[in-house]
């Protein structure tokens, strides 16, 4: 398989500079344009099973990725679950029951076409790359080939990267990660509500959705102790709350 000249240049620049903490080098916006999209977002799965945004073009891509993360549905979720690419050239025609909470929000955000691929090795999904566009339309055969080669190159870079202790310590709140506060808040909620980390993340997402707030903002409030998930004290027989 041979990629286009434009994608060849993208792949040549994809490896990060020596000593860089970035997972990928080059320009994500240019990468998206080569495939016929407005932007892209790459999220990797951490050692704790969380999702962390590591490479993103300017614009609405990060917002769309955060929306998928908050709602727990969307093309990236489907791509990861199926270990197969998901293509939706027109979001207005997607069945409402497929992504019931996401569709309206995505269209309001300005997302009309999406394409998402898993970065997987066998049955293990290490992350996803999602492309979005403000205008509907299908991908060309050349773009699909370029996308597959891009995913293979990204997977190779992830596998080639030495283990990073900060990735496994995201829950402790390393600020260079996009969702550092989310992971830290999840740990705090787990302790407060006496639930597992997975259940704590669901509580955080549900609170964010119910209050129509970005999950990152709610997480920051949890970390700052402006929002907590402790059960209120039970009243005693006299109606006073127990200490």
Image: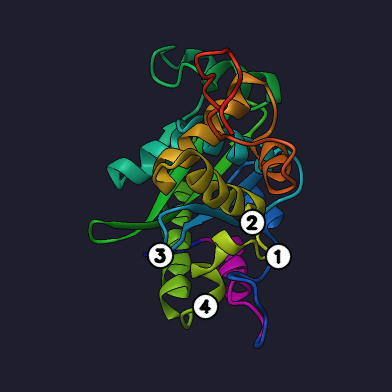
Per the model, the C-alpha gap separating discs 2 and 4 is: 15 Å
For disc 1, the marked residue is: 176
Residue 38 location, quadrant: top right
Question: Height in image: 135 above or below 221?
Answer: above
For disc 3, the marked residue is: 152
Disc 3 crowd, CA 10 A, few/some/many (<14, 14-19, 20+): some
SS at mark 2?
A: helix
Task: Give the camera-side residue of 110 and 127.
Answer: 127
Q: In this rendering, would 11 be left or right of 195?
A: right
Q: Tag 3 or tag 1, which sits nearer the N-term?
A: 3
For disc 2, the marked residue is: 180
Instruction: Inspect the magenta stretch and tell me whether residue 5 lies in it.
Output: yes
For disc 4, the marked residue is: 164
Per the model, the C-alpha gap separating discs 2 and 1 is: 7 Å
Quarter in which the N terminus is drawn? bottom left
Q: Tag 1 or tag 4, which sits nearer the N-term?
A: 4
């Amino acid at each position: 398989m041979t990629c286009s000249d434009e994608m060849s240049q993208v792949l040549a620049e994809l490896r990060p500079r020596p000593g860089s903490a970035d997972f990928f080098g080059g320009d994500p916006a240019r990468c998206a344009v080569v495939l016929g999209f407005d932007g892209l977002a790459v999220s990797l799965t951490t050692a704790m099973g969380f999702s962390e945004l590591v490479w993103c073009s300017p614009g609405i891509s990060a917002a769309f990725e955060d929306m998928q993360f908050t709602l727990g549905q969307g093309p990236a979720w489907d791509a990861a679950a199926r270990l197969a690419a998901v293509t939706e050239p027109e979001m207005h025609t997607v069945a409402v029951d497929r992504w019931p909470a996401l569709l309206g929000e995505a269209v309001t955000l300005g997302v009309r076409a999406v394409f998402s691929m898993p970065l997987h090795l066998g049955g293990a999904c290490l992350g996803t790359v999602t492309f979005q566009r403000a205008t509907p339309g299908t991908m060309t055969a050349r773009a699909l080939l370029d996308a597959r080669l891009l995913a293979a190159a990204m997977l190779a870079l992830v596998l080639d990267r030495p283990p990073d202790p900060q990735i496994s310590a995201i829950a402790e709140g390393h600020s260079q990660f996009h969702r550092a506060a989310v992971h830290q808040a999840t740990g705090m909620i787990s302790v407060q509500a006496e639930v597992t980390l997975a259940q704590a993340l669901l509580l955080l997402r549900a609170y964010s959705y119910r209050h129509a707030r970005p999950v990152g903002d709610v997480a920051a409030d949890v970390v700052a102790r402006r929002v907590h998930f402790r059960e209120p004290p039970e009243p005693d027989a006299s109606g006073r709350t127990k200490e």
